[in-house]
Image (tube, rainbow, N blue to C red):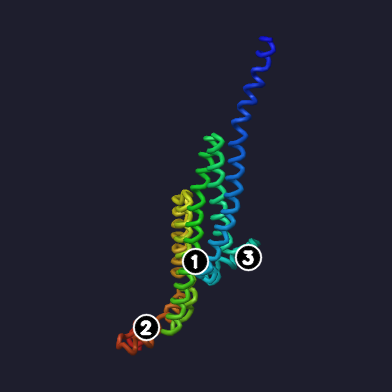
Amino acid sequence: MEKMDMALEPLRGFLVQLGEFLPRLLVAILILLAGWVLAKAIRLAVAKALKAFNLNVLAERAGVDGFLRQGGIQTDTIGILSALVYWLAILAALMIAFSSLGMTHVTELTGRIALFIPKVIVAVLVLAFGAYFSRFIDNTITAYGKNVGLQDVEILGRLARYAIMVFVVLIALEQVQVETELVRLSFLILLAGLVLALALAFGLGSRQRAADLLDRWWPRDAERRSGTPCPTNEKEDSAK
């Protein structure tokens, strides 16, 4: 009899542990189901709230939604933000469920992932508002240049827009804790190379083209109206 009890002791211990584990497993499943239902409700609420704030209009005017469609993504900015909030709620439910099961390491890993999602949400918002602001600056510069009679003003607007977008992308990368020092240095090197190439082109082979551009941007008629003598006219008079 004692030998039978000794043989059944491991089985008895397993059944005791199983009896303690099953209620916690049931609680974890209920937590996951409740978290899933709550996550879907939060996703719908977030989507309606963002549409109420006209974020879809802002993203469409900024060109973010068009960029997503060109990349083959079937959703828009509001859909991406709603999905991120949905998965944040799901991860929170997973953390509670794993914690109830005593799975500490899995809970910590899930918590790290959950803490990363708000940073992605902020990065998406920065890109959306930054793209809208860059397009606004582009349109403002273009409209002002056309009103004052500047030619080729679209180029200046595009340059300002792209410069703003570069800094916006750098800010978004910093939000998701991507090392931006290398990106920033690469951008500065490319910018310096572009400026040097333009300077050499204008200085060596395109002096006449540069003079034509400057004459179109700042016409000499304005100098004559202001009473400032034109240097080329002075040279022509002295030659005569």
Q: Quadrant of the N terminus?
A: top right
Q: Is residue 26 above or below residue 62?
A: above
Q: Give the Cα separation between the discs numbered 1 and 2.
A: 43 Å
Q: Please, what is the three-letter code of the amino acid marked with disc 3?
A: Arg
Is residue 153 rendered to the left or right of residue 71?
left
- Residue 93 or residue 131, whichever sits in front: 93
Mark 1 vs 2: CB contact within 8 A: no
Q: Which mark is residue 232?
A: 2
One can see residue 205 in this view: no
Earlier-in-chain disc, 3 versus 1: 3
Q: Could you tell me which residue is drawn at 49 percent across and 71 percent down? A: 135
Q: Which residue is under mark 3? A: 69
Q: Quadrant of residue 18?
A: top right
Q: Please, what is the three-letter code of the amino acid marked with disc 1?
A: Ala
- Residue 181 or residue 16, whichever sits in front: 16
Q: Which mark is residue 217?
A: none
- Residue 104 or residue 184, whichever sits in front: 104
Q: Give the Cα separation between the discs numbered 3 and 1.
A: 16 Å
Q: Which residue is under mark 1? A: 131
Mark 3 vs 1: CB contact within 8 A: no
Secondary structure at numbered mark 3: helix
Secondary structure at numbered mark 1: helix
Q: Please, what is the three-letter code of the amino acid marked with disc 2?
A: Thr
Mark 3 vs 2: CB contact within 8 A: no
Q: Dot 1, crowdedness within 10 Å: few (<14), some or many (≥20)?
A: many
Q: Nearer the viewer, mark 3 or mark 2?
A: 3
One can see residue 231 in this view: yes
Q: Could you tell me which residue is drawn at 53 percent across and 71 percent down? A: 57
Place of residue 99 in the rendered image (x, y in percent of width and height, measured from the top left): 53, 38
Place of residue 169 in the rendered image (x, y in percent of width and height, measured from the top left): 48, 59
